[in-house]
Image (cartoon, helix red, strand yellow):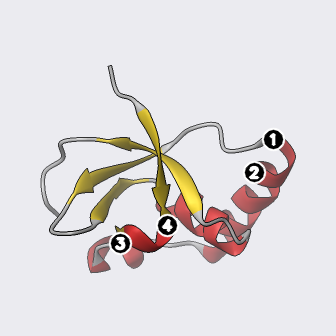
Amino acid sequence: MLKVQDIPIDEIYVPTARRKTLDEAKAAELAEDILENGLKIPIQVRQGKGRFVLAEGLHRLHACISLGEEKIPAYLVQARKF
């Protein structure tokens, strides 16, 4: 079973291909929901070279960034490279 860890946001790298799929309006809407209800589903990251690489949760990550969060709950997964 995967364990949730609090990961520093500044240690998470978002691959270029994934960044292109960001919908700012969706991230802003999600930020409002996180303010009211908290983050319900942790993001997924994999271990990279000296950093974490985002596997799933781009909009959740950007919502937390916009809220000024320094850490985000995440699952550390074994994922294939993009």
Q: Are marks 4 and 3 in contact (CB under 8 Å)?
A: no
How many angstroms separate mark 1 from mark 3 (CA)?
25 Å
Disc nearer the start of the sequence (4/1): 4
| Residue farthest along the right direction in this orientation | 36
Disc nearer the start of the sequence (2/3): 3
Q: Is residue 16 above or below residue 61?
A: below
Instruction: For mark 2, give the secondary structure.
Output: helix
Q: In this view, does 10 lie above or below 76?
A: below
Mark 1 lies on residue: 37
The residue closer to the viewer here, 49 or 78, is: 49
Quadrant including the N terminus: top left
Mark 2 lies on residue: 34
User: Label 3 is placed on what type of residue?
Assistant: Val
User: Label 2 is placed on what type of residue?
Assistant: Ile
Instruction: For mark 4, give the secondary structure.
Output: helix
How many angstroms separate mark 4 from mark 1 (CA)?
20 Å
Quadrant including the C terminus: bottom left
Mark 3 lies on residue: 14
How many angstroms separate mark 4 from mark 3 (CA)?
11 Å
Mark 4 lies on residue: 9
Q: Residue at x 49, y 67 (%)?
A: 9
Disc nearer the start of the sequence (1/3): 3
Q: Are marks 2 and 3 in contact (CB under 8 Å)?
A: no
How many angstroms separate mark 2 from mark 3 (CA)?
21 Å
Q: Residue at x 13, y 51 (%)?
A: 80
Disc nearer the start of the sequence (2/4): 4
Q: Residue at x 62, y 71 (%)?
A: 65
